[in-house]
Image (cartoon, rainbow, N blue to C red):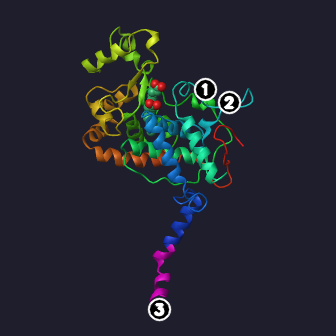
Amino acid sequence: MERKAFIKHPLVHLFHIFFLSHLVFCQLDYRFYGSTCPNLTKIVRYGVWSAIANDTRMAASLIRLHFHDCFVNGCDGSILLDDVGSTFVGEKTAMPNQNSVRGYEVIDRIKADVEKFCPSTVSCTDILTLAARDAATIAGARYWMVALGRRDGRTANKTAANQLPSPFESLDNIISKFNSKGLDTKDVVVLSGAHTIGFAQCFTFKHRLFNFGGSGKPDPDLETSFLKGLQNVCPDQTDSDSTLVALDSPTTNRFDNGYYRNLVNSSGLLQSDHVLSTDNRTASMVVNYSKYPYLFLKDFGASMVKMANIGVLTGQDGEIRKDCKVVN
Ligand code: HEM
């Protein structure tokens, strides 16, 4: 009797409507490979852990690889595709990626391991999404859940990859590029916090060190001792262009809020980072994250989930590649 009354309760109907529509419209699922590849998360985590044990910077590189995948054609693994002669043009040789993005071989290796246990089942882009989460958490970020079921694209877009946000462009441009992917200004501030780990080449910020905006002087906003250090490591000559500098030098390998503390101390490396602390749309968020590490770590997970949902292929769209480097 009691059970019948429960089933008829209008809230139950509402729940079903909500739950079913959730399944229809948002086809990603936390247990997507629960029966088809039960060991998936363990295989990925082990692969990421051993890559980072061998090369600490790989944590940063995997997070960036995921970002550069999702911002071009959506999160579809398109960045992982190799060029094939003149018949297929991939994204690896696009300007923001070439000699800069790393970690392709880590994803290829994990995919090969996953194929041994669950052949033709798990997409490369889901592996990359899990790998980025694991990389961040191994470096110190707070864990977040990743819904799965993305499928791999059959195309790549080098022209779009050349339009990835650049450290030389205005905050207006960067915000509108994020907006075009369904991300907002807060996501720009939060996701830029990934620059709490990893490295940048001197050429990406050297214009701030010697002749900022044609003034013949460094960027006046750069803190003096930070500036001196950078001028030493990145002297004003082209042979220093590819020298690496930590994006957050006090805690280079630690996923913390050090990035925001640097920004409030005029010690942000990239121009596109620094501007977040001076623009009135973003400055108060920077101050808050510099004070409250917990707030940043919580918001970072939420923004990464948003980024991982950009333009995903599900259902019958796309494919499950066997080798992340080539379409089937
Ligand atoms: C907001 C616009 C962004 C710009 C302009 C930008 C620009 C850059 C640049 C220029 C580098 C150095 C690349 C090199 O020197 O080879 C870099 C590194 C990095 N970026 Fe960003 N980035 C942005 C957003 C993001 C986002 C959204 C993420 C991830 C959520 C991210 C994660 C990283 C990481 C982890 C590194 C270090 C990679 C490594 O050491 O291998 N960036 N970024």
* Residue to which mark 1 is pinned: 93
* Residue indicated by mark 3: 1
> In the image as oriented, which residue stretches furthest toward the right?
87
Pinpoint residue 109: horizontal percent, then vertical percent.
58, 41
**Magenta-colored span:** 2-13
- Asked if the residue at label 3 sits under 8 Å from ligand 1, the reply is no
Image quadrant, ligand 1: top left
Which tag is nearer the camera, tag 3 or tag 2? 2
Amino acid type for the residue under numbered disc 3: Met
- Secondary structure of the residue carrying numbered label 2: loop
Vertical order, 177 against 308 (above or below): above
How crowded is the residue under tag 1: few (<14 C-alpha within 10 Å), some, or many (20+)? some
Residue at the image position 45 percent from the left and 43 percent from the top: 49
Q: Earlier in the sequence, mark 1 or mark 3?
A: 3
Contact, mark 1 vs mark 2 (Cβ under 8 Å): yes
Q: Secondary structure under badge 3?
A: loop
The amino acid on which the numbered mark 2 sits, given as a three-letter code, is Asp
Tell me which label, 1 or 2, sits earlier in the chain.
2
Q: Position of residue 92 (x, y in %)?
A: 60, 30
Q: Residues within 10 Å of mark 3 (few under 14, many from 20)?
A: few
**Residue 270 is at least partly visible in this image:** no
Residue 278 placement (x, y as % from top left): 31, 29
Distance, label 1 to label 3, CA atoms, is 67 Å
Q: Residue at x 43, y 8 (%)?
A: 237
Numbered mark located on residue 34 in the image:
none
| Residue 9 forms part of the magenta stretch | yes
Distance from disc 1 to disc 2, alpha carbons, whole Å, reads 8 Å
Residue at the disc numbered 2: 83
